[in-house]
Image (cartoon, grey):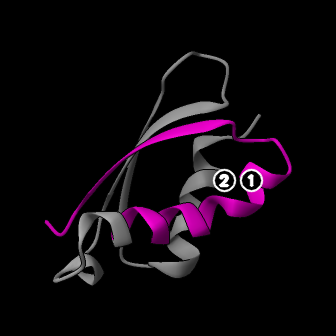
């Protein structure tokens, strides 16, 4: 299991100005809907945005704290 704050910390380590909103999709603290908004995504395609966020989450995915995510990304 992982906390929303831990997820936010992982993402903001790469994107310090990002606004991160999370929803625990199942109530089990391992499946989340994550919305990341940052100007750093300006001009970046959606697949590259999602790959970048997934790279931030990789440690938690690999050690099993995080099982699945649904991503939403935006610039504003």
Judged from this view, the residue extending furthest toward the top is 27
Disc on res. 6: 2
The structure residue drawn at horizontal position 69% and vertical position 61%, both measured from the top left corner, is 58
Residue 18 horizontal/vertical position (percent): 36, 69
Residue 5 horizontal/vertical position (percent): 60, 50
Residue 3 horizontal/vertical position (percent): 67, 40
Relative horizontal placement of residue 67, taking residue 19 as reference (left or right): right
Q: Earlier in the sequence, mark 2 or mark 1?
A: 2
Judged from this view, the residue extending furthest toward the right is 63
The residues colored magenta run 49-76
Corner quadrant of residue 50: bottom left
In terms of secondary structure, where does tag 1 sit? helix
The structure residue drawn at horizontal position 70% and vertical position 41%, both measured from the top left corner, is 66
Task: Please state which of residues 32 and 68 is positioned toward the viewer in this rendering.
Answer: 68
Task: Please state which of residues 28 and 9 is positioned toward the viewer in this rendering.
Answer: 28
Residue 27 in the image: above or below residue 74: above
Q: Is residue 61 visible?
A: yes
Asked if the magenta segment contains residue 67, the reply would be yes
Residue 45 in the image: above or below residue 22: below
Q: Is residue 10 visible?
A: no
Circle 2 residues within 10 Å: few <14, some 14–19, many ≥20: few
Residue that badge 1 annotates: 60
Residue 7 in the image: above or below residue 65: below
Residue 70 horizontal/vertical position (percent): 43, 39
Asked if the magenta segment contains residue 66, the reply would be yes
Residue 26 in the image: above or below residue 47: above
Relative horizontal placement of residue 32, taking residue 72 as reference (left or right): right
Image label count? 2
């Amino acid at each position: 299991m992982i906390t929303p704050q831990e997820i936010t910390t992982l993402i903001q380590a790469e994107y310090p100005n990002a606004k991160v909103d999370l929803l625990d999709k199942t109530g089990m603290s391992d499946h989340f809907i994550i919305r990341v908004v940052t100007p750093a995504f300006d001009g970046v395609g959606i697949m590259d945005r999602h790959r970048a966020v997934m790279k931030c989450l990789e440690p938690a995915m690999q050690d099993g704290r995080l099982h699945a995510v649904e991503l939403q990304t935006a610039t504003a």
